[in-house]
Image (cartoon, rainbow, N blue to C red):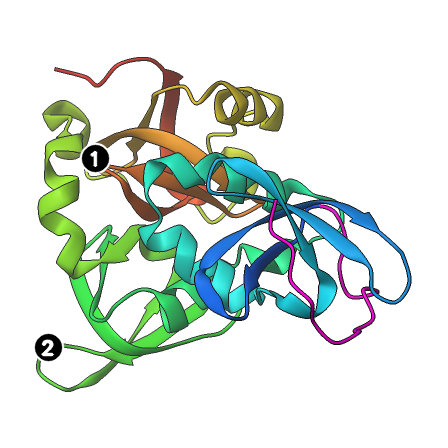
């Protein structure tokens, strides 16, 4: 237990499930597990460093959504469960996981987009509802319809991802195109995704272009899956799915 005499400070900003860090040493961070109002200052119990520690409210600061996203991208595997628990907390907003913000603010540029027409590496990314704009390797401004994108990740992470990405040649040869009608797309039950996430199951994702990705589901929403593949975060667009199964990687 850590006890320090510090000036009084209200604890109303703290709630169970929040990610916080120690002002004096930002490397000490974790999830709030309990808040104990008291005078002159409330105490906050935090799960950090593999154990529950107690702090005065004035010693701590709440991590922002941007800070949480940055930690997700490069977090070591032993911290992932803690981050997931916080992001699933009803006290956290769904915007803590936001594909557009990951692509434009948090992925190291250039970001590699795997599309129906090939690979596109873009920097200075800006997004709208159905379009994504950026600057290509030739310093030319370009745009991609989101419907064309299958998955995306920082280009620099390609060596880490390559062993976990295969090609199903027969499917690739069909040269399937994007499906504009949502009713014609492959749909996966969210219950299956929640269970796979809870069990930390290996998941095989097959895109309509024949790419086969194997990893674990970190989070998902109506439009994308946030996968951890080779220890790195990959954004997979649900409209481009051809198949999803639970199991070991394909040969």
State which quadrant residue 34 falls in: top right
In the displayed structure, would residue 241 be above or below residue 112?
A: above
Query: In the figure, is residue 35 to the left or right of 210?
Result: right
> CA separation, marks 2 and 1?
24 Å
Q: Is residue 117 left or right of residue 84?
A: left
Q: Secondary structure at mark 2?
A: loop
Looking at the image, tell me whether mark 2 or mark 1 is earlier in sequence order. Answer: 2
37 relative position to 43: left or right: right
Q: Which residue corresponds to the image point at 25% horizontal and 53% vertical from the top-left?
A: 115
Q: Is residue 6 magenta?
A: yes
Q: Quadrant of residue 52?
A: top right
Name the residue: 52% across, 39% down: 82
Query: What residue sits 39% from the left and 23% below the top?
Result: 244
Q: Nearer the viewer, residue 178 or 33?
A: 33
Q: Main secondary structure of the magenta part?
A: loop
Q: Looking at the image, which residue is at 26% across and 67% down?
A: 108
Classify the position of the C terminus by image quarter: top left
Q: Position of residue 225 (x, y in %)?
A: 45, 41
Along the viewing direction, whichever of 215 and 209 lies nearer the viewer? 215
Q: Is residue 45 magenta?
A: no
Q: Which stretch appears magenta?
A: 1-16
Residue 130 showing in the rendered view? no
- Local SS, label 1: strand
Q: Position of residue 187 (x, y in %)?
A: 52, 29
Task: Give the percent coordinates (x, y) of residue 243.
Answer: 37, 24
User: Split into 4 quadrants, where in the image is the N terminus?
Assistant: top right
Q: Which residue is mark 1?
A: 211
Indicate whether 27 appears above or below 79.
below
Q: Nearer the viewer, residue 140 or 246?
A: 246
Vertical arrangement, residue 249 with respect to residue 38, above or below: above
Task: Return the residue at label 2.
Answer: 137
Q: Is residue 9 left or right of residue 27?
A: right
């Amino acid at each position: 237990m850590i006890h320090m005499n510090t000036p009084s400070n209200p604890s109303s900003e703290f709630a169970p499930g929040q990610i916080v860090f120690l002002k004096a040493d930002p490397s000490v961070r974790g999830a709030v597990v309990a808040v104990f109002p008291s005078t002159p200052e409330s105490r906050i119990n935090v799960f950090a460093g593999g154990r529950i520690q107690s702090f005065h409210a004035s010693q701590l600061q709440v991590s922002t959504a941007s800070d949480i996203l940055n930690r997700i991208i490069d977090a070591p595997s032993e911290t992932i469960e803690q981050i997931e628990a916080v992001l699933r907390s009803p006290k956290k907003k769904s915007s803590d996981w936001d594909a557009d913000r990951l692509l434009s603010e948090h992925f190291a540029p250039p970001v590699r987009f795997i599309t129906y027409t090939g690979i596109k590496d873009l920097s200075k990314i800006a997004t709208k509802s159905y379009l994504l704009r950026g600057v290509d390797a030739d310093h030319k401004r370009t745009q991609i319809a989101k419907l064309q994108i299958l998955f995306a990740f920082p280009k620099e992470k390609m060596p880490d991802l390559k062993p976990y990405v295969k090609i199903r040649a027969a499917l690739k040869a069909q040269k399937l195109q994007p499906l504009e009608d949502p009713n014609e797309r492959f749909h996966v039950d969210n219950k299956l995704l929640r269970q796979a996430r809870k069990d930390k199951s290996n998941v095989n994702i097959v895109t309509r272009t024949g790419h086969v990705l194997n990893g674990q589901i970190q989070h998902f929403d109506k439009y994308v899956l946030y996968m951890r593949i080779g220890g790195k975060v990959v954004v997979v667009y649900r409209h481009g799915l051809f198949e999803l199964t639970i199991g070991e990687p394909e040969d």
